[in-house]
């Protein structure tokens, strides 16, 4: 596991070499104006006397202040809070049978990528761990141009017609009167929208599940949601859906953990990703495709073009075709992450659109957003957005134009330049829209095949473990308890009885609504792949907090910490103050976190060593709080021989997931195994 997560060698550095000329090192240099004029005084403004007014001729001050005043650009309306990293995609097997896309032809070939993870509801200053939809956007820098694969942690969308997308996001965003709440859909407007637009049922089930509060972006699945087309060199098309599967498995926070972390460390996910890459624990995701032959389009009990429906993996298997390794952090957040611009119309030959209505509606909106944010239609020429292959066209001028086009001719057709730049025939790599036959009357309507709102929502519920079902009920209960209008709460209860009557009845009891009168749809099928119960589990890159003071058993603790690190576990030494702690035998450990600067929710597991402190009472209280929190949240706990005094279970505790060195001969291995399990749901 350790080797596979670290990725492969030096990798594909083509994008990094392209970015190199734009990387500027200021350290060790003399300060200048933007025009290169050396500055003699960089601390004081030019005044009429040392207590007099500032003079207008201090152009250096005005340039410095003016640039600061205009440093911010409009944030994205959705997906405003995000974080990006570089990586590479490696193809496992050729897909030439299905697509002529160049980067999917040769096994072993690599393609540079840039990936941006994000949340939807909150602004740039919100928290990472909110219960929310997340973005999983991947930009492939292929030899045929940039290809953007835009995804979510769910395989379904909230509505099935793009005309209602704006309404859904207006409802999700804060109340326009108060701009409250931030990073939360727990308010009247969102749930009123849900109750009155019931195609949202399936999507909402995912949002109320553990999938909406991932433990890490490194442990989050990504789905491209929409149905696309593969097209091969013979012109034959195949419907396709894409998904990313994290090698580390799909793991989540408990709701209480996510809420606490949002306060004590709102940057948790971005720090987690950055720290993992810095440590060489490169996140790896495998790319899977689901494919349906066009002639089989109508053979299923769901519409393959309906974006509120998934393709069950038991019906349409997932074929793994490659892996993506994220192996480099950005050098500058603004220049790379904030200025990155993704667009669903960034396609390559061999990947094309379908009549998926949400996909159709997305085909123009991204360009408008990026031009508004980045101030110009020239945003594709920013270094992070620039393709690896050269581009030539007759588009000219505009704000922030970097290119110096030296041609006389800027039109087509022409004779002066021999009709160049000119088109490329499809057989030579030119992009061509799929020649799909289209017929029908112009109507504002949705297909009858899209109007089964609850069967797949019920399928999702049936697929959950008992623990996951409890979490979904808790999530609904928390969210709806925040809704002020009883009428809205009642509408939601009456809607979700169609998914499960027992679930809706329990939620109604919790939020003061009447029990629902209806019953759930008669669907008994389940899809085990939708549950996180059987997801892969590893100790690799899990974070263990070592709670320690002076006087510990040095050889015992050093051996355990060394073994944890050998297994790729991240270890923090936590005590009441920074510095070092010293064992009975003189072994010293460097303390890098204090009880004051961290929190038990920031650790996947605890290793309780204990020891002596100048303020023993406070030390003991802190350790007790950490143990109680970890135990409450079903986290693994290791107890060193010197830590027994801090662990006082009652007769009601079954101690599931607690490994004690005192009675465990192979403690190191047993503790690592427990760390890998991550949760012990059978704990009492």
Image: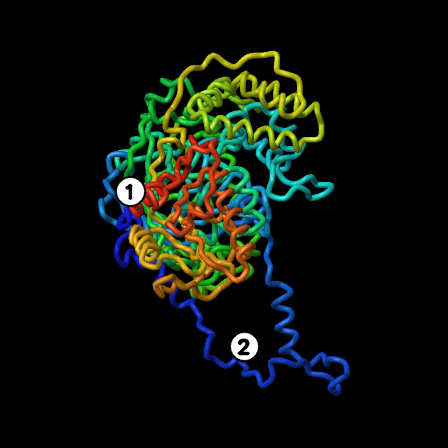
The residue labelled by disc 1 is 322
Query: Secondary structure beneath disc 2?
Result: loop
What is the spatial separation of the Cα atoms under label 1 and label 2, in whole angstroms?
Answer: 47 Å
**Does label 1 or label 2 sit earlier along the sequence?**
2
Residue furthest to the bottom in view is 49
**Residue under label 2:** 35
Q: Is residue 390 left or right of residue 366?
A: left
Q: Is residue 30 left or right of residue 240?
A: right
62 or 144, which is in the foreground?
62
Describe residue 167's horizontal placement relative to residue 528 as left or right: right
Visible in this render: residue 408?
no
Against 322, is 496 above or below? Answer: above
Q: What residue is shown at x 56% (from left), y 31% (from top)? A: 475
Residue drawn at x 44%, y 53% as measured from the top left: 610
- The numbered dot on residue 459 is none
| On screen, residue 447 above or below 226 | above
Q: Position of residue 66 (x, y in %)?
A: 64, 69
Secondary element type, mark 1 = strand
| Residue ID at (40%, 64%) | 582
- Seen from this angle, which residue lies furthest right? 52
- Residue 194 lies, in percent from the top left, at 60, 27
In the rendered view, tell whether residue 146 sits above or below residue 397.
above
């Amino acid at each position: 596991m350790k080797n596979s997560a670290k990725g492969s060698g030096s990798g594909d550095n083509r994008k990094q070499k392209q970015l190199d000329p734009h990387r500027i090192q200021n350290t060790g240099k003399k300060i200048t104006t933007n025009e290169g004029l050396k500055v003699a005084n960089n601390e004081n403004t030019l005044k009429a006397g040392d207590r007099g007014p500032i003079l207008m001729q201090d152009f250096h001050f005005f340039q410095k202040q003016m640039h600061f005043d205009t440093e911010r650009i409009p944030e994205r309306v959705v997906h405003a809070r995000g974080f990006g990293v570089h990586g590479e995609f490696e193809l496992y097997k050729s897909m030439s049978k299905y697509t002529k896309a160049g980067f999917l032809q040769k096994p072993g070939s690599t393609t540079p990528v840039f990936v941006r993870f994000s949340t939807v509801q909150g602004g740039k200053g919100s928290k990472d761990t909110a219960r929310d939809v997340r973005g999983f956007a991947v930009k492939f820098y292929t030899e045929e141009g940039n290809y953007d694969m835009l995804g979510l942690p769910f395989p379904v969308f909230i509505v099935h017609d793009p005309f209602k997308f704006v309404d859904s996001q207006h409802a999700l965003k804060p109340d326009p009167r108060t701009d409250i709440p931030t990073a939360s859909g727990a308010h009247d407007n969102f749930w009123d929208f849900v109750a009155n637009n019931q195609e949202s049922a399936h999507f909402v089930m995912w949002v109320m599940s553990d999938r909406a509060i991932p433990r890490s972006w490194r442990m989050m699945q990504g789905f491209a949601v929409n149905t696309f087309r593969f097209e091969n060199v013979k012109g034959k098309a195949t419907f396709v859906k894409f998904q990313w599967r994290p090698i580390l498995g799909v793991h989540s926070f408990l709701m209480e953990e996510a809420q606490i972390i949002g306060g004590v460390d709102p940057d948790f996910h971005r720090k987690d990703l950055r720290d993992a890459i810095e440590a060489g624990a490169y996140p790896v995701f495998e790319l899977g495709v689901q494919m349906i032959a066009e002639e089989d389009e109508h053979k299923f009990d769901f519409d393959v073009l309906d974006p509120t429906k998934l393709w069950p993996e038991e019906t349409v298997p997932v074929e793994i075709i490659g892996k993506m390794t994220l192996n480099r952090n950005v050098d500058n957040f603004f220049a790379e992450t904030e200025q990155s611009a993704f667009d669903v119309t960034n396609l390559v030959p061999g990947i094309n659109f379908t009549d998926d209505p949400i996909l159709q509606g997305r085909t123009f909106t991204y360009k408008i957003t990026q031009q508004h944010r980045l101030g110009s239609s020239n945003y594709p020429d920013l270094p992070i957005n620039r393709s690896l292959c050269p581009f030539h066209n007759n588009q000219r001028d505009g704000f922030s134009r970097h290119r110096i086009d030296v041609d006389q001719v800027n039109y087509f057709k022409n004779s002066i330049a021999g009709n160049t730049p000119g088109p490329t025939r499809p057989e030579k790599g030119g992009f061509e829209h799929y020649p799909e036959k289209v017929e029908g009357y112009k109507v504002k309507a949705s297909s009858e095949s899209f109007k089964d709102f609850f069967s797949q929502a019920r399928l999702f519920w049936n697929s959950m473990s008992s623990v996951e079902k409890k979490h979904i009920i808790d999530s609904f209960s928390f969210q709806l308890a925040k809704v002020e209008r009883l009428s809205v709460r009642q509408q939601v209860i009456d809607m979700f009885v169609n998914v499960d009557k027992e679930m809706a009845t329990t939620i109604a009891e919790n939020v003061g609504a009447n029990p629902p009168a209806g019953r759930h749809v008669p669907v008994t099928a389940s899809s085990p792949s939708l549950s996180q119960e059987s997801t892969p589990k590893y100790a690799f890159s899990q974070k263990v907090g070592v709670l320690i003071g002076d006087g510990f058993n040095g050889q015992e603790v050093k051996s355990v910490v060394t073994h944890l690190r050998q297994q790729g576990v991240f270890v923090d030494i936590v005590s009441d103050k920074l510095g070092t702690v010293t064992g009975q035998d003189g072994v010293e450990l460097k303390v890098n976190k204090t009880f004051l600067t961290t929190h038990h929710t920031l650790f996947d597991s605890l290793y309780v060593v204990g020891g002596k402190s100048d303020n023993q009472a406070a030390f003991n209280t802190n350790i007790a709080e950490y143990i109680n929190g970890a135990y409450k949240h079903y986290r693994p706990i290791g107890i060193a021989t010197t830590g027994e005094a801090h662990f006082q279970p009652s007769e009601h505790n079954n101690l599931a997931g607690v490994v004690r060195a005192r009675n465990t001969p192979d403690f190191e291995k047993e503790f690592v195994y427990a760390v890998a399990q991550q949760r012990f749901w059978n704990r009492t």
